[in-house]
Amino acid sequence: MTRATVAQALVSFLANQYTERDGVRRRLFAGCFGIFGHGNIAGIGQALLQAGDELRYYQARNEQAMVHTAAAYARVSDRLSTFACTSSVGPGATNMVTGAAGATINRLPVLLLPGDVFATRPADPVLQQLQTASAGDVSVNDCLRPVSVWFDRIMRPEQLLDAAPAAMRALTDPAATGAVTLALPQDVQAEAYDWPAAFTVPRVWPVRRAVADPESLAEAVAAIRAAHRPLIVAGGGVRYSAATGALAGFAAATGIPVAETQAGKGSLRHDHPGAVGAIGATGSTAANALAAEADLVLGIGTRFADFTTASHTAFADPDVRFVNVNVCAADAVRLSGLAVLADARRALEQLTGALAGWQVPDAYRRRAADLTAAWSSTVDRAYRLGHAPLPAQSEVIGAVNEAATDADIVVCAAGSMPGDLHKLWRAGAPRQYHVEYGYSCMGYEIAGGLGAKLAIGAEGEVFVLVGDGSYLMMAQELVTAVAEGVKLIVVLVDNAGFASIGALSETVGAPRFGTWYRYRDEGGGLTGDVLPTDLAANAASLGAAVCEVSTVDELRSALAAARRGERTTVIRIATDPLVPAPDSAAWWDVPVAETAGLAATVTARREYEQAKQAQRHYL
Ligand SMILES: Cc1ncc(C[n+]2csc(CCOP(=O)(O)OP(=O)(O)O)c2C)c(N)n1
Ligand SMILES: [Mg+2]
């Protein structure tokens, strides 16, 4: 028995948790991010101080951001390692809600340790305590319930003996992982208990690879053999399961073309003969043409979100069928697919064996190659538009793509860049492409870049692509990067507003409304003079090295200099928000006002109704 506080026992427990997959063991927690207040400084804070490097503490600047950082770290670590995040009670805890939703939606493990109000209630209400008229046992931490895959509140010390392992199970289950919350009342954190020694001995959580059962495998093989125009849709599960090698082998052996979702992009090197690029609303014309014709879609590790299916218009063959390999049962049955409940790598190995000697028709293989070559020329042109006076965003993406090696990572999340990156980026190694597009959360970029860089260390550079809107929302983790000596190369793409929503607004009959960053004009509108905002000066004030460039050639030199340098660098470039990336020939469902007094809206509604006719149920 060891006498220790709940917080001390929990920190010691966390420091001794490991994952193991394919014989490789790693620490489940690389450390603990946190911001202290009265709800955690005396408990978890004291315990982290006492523990020292047993579980290293990292100071964040915003609680939402630290959850993004942890999620990004987990993503780069194939979900086998993450961070814990401690917050105070009240606003520190609710700041984590957005980060938690992002982690859960992207299926990334993150452990949240919000402080909570007193369990013993000696002097309620305490500072920051929520009081409602209807219940005495709710606190603001209950906001974390719907965004957590597991939630528990530790009201008594001994409860931790059961609750802590339950939380680890949830974090390390590939089919159910996401944000996990252990709410910690501030008095309980500091309470002492006699802990059995076995509680804090090293514990290994095996991450097993489930194989497909013989029946579903046989049905999947039969469906593939019967197909004339099969198409693979590779999702995030391919990358998390480290199945990219198995996928490359399967694609080469069978000739089935491989399209990629946002989370799955990078599953195949862009120059693999089977790679047809991004699919869906932000896809390549090659993948989308093949999707429109496919008679069989083999989804691997994807949940077929609306961007992937182009809001259920991408797969147009009336008899198209789906075979879905997934560890998550709910995802495996999407689009009425044949569910193959299995780890992506194991299932691909099984399918490769069972389909030995079978190939798609030669003509189909050639068609996929021709379509891909045409899209590749489109990308070449977009990379070198020579647009003036301000460069186009596609040229910025081209410059960063050409500056990035296979060991580097590009990070992005919201705005017009995720779609453009999905279409245009030529991915090398699987982990190179890191776009958070499950939650597409403005503000993820710099915080997520920090997590990615903590995960790869000196192995490579992290290029953060961030729009001016996202930058304004959450740039503060630049301070954390500077403080920790974690080097980021941030490319700040400044187009004076929301290019993405600006373009969307045009198609939904609300042209450019509220999407510029401008002074109010004399008519009371929002299209006055350009604001004097100086984001480069802002970045410099946070401690980053800053470089302002105005041409793509200057950008290339600045990227090279930033690579040679040791400091976190922000490169600011102004771009023309009105140049779209090449068209995907795909649609995204955003409903338009059914009745309106504006001519633009009426026209947009007519077009919407037309497009909507292609939408279907896959039953
Ligand atoms: C937290 C959050 N709020 C709102 C949105 C909706 N939204 C998506 S993109 C965008 C604008 C992003 O602006 P910026 O970062 O400048 O990128 P740009 O569109 O100019 O490329 C907004 C408001 C979001 N994704 N996340
Ligand atoms: Mg912008």
Image (cartoon, rainbow, N blue to C red):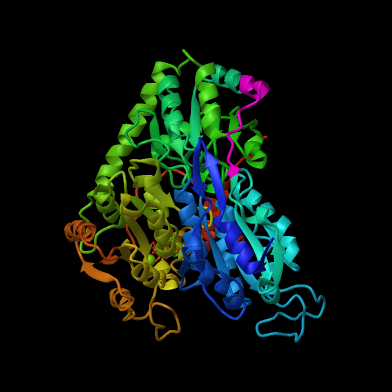
- Report the magenta residues as a range: 205-219
Q: Residue 274: horizontal and vertical position, in percent?
A: 39, 29
Left or right of residue 126, residue 82 in this image: left
- Whether the magenta-drawn stretch holds residue 159 is answered as no
Q: Is residue 498 above or below residue 274?
A: below
Left or right of residue 375, residue 64 in this image: right
Quadrant, the N terminus:
bottom right
Residue plotted at (29% across, 71% down): 544
Quadrant of res 486? bottom left
Q: Residue 591: horizontal and vertical position, in percent?
A: 58, 57
Taking depth in this image into account, of 404 and 81 the one nearest to the observer is 81
Taking depth in this image into account, of 314 and 559 the one nearest to the observer is 559
Q: Which residue lies furthest to the front in this view?
A: 1
Residue plotted at (33% across, 41% down): 428
Residue 488 visible in the current orientation: yes
Q: Residue furthest right?
A: 134
Q: Quadrant of ligand 2?
A: bottom left
Q: Is residue 503 above or below residue 284?
A: below
Q: Residue 217: horizontal and vertical position, in percent?
A: 62, 23
Left or right of residue 328, residue 575 in this image: left
- Total labels drawn: 0
Residue 309 visible in the current orientation: no
Left or right of residue 16, residue 288 in this image: left
Q: In this view, does 378 lie above or below 389?
A: above
Quadrant, the C terminus:
top right
Residue plotted at (63% across, 68% down): 7
Residue plotted at (59% across, 55% down): 104
Q: Residue 19: horizontal and vertical position, in percent?
A: 55, 45
Taking depth in this image into account, of 283 and 189 the one nearest to the observer is 189
Quadrant of res 426? top left
- Whether the magenta-drawn stretch holds residue 208 is answered as yes
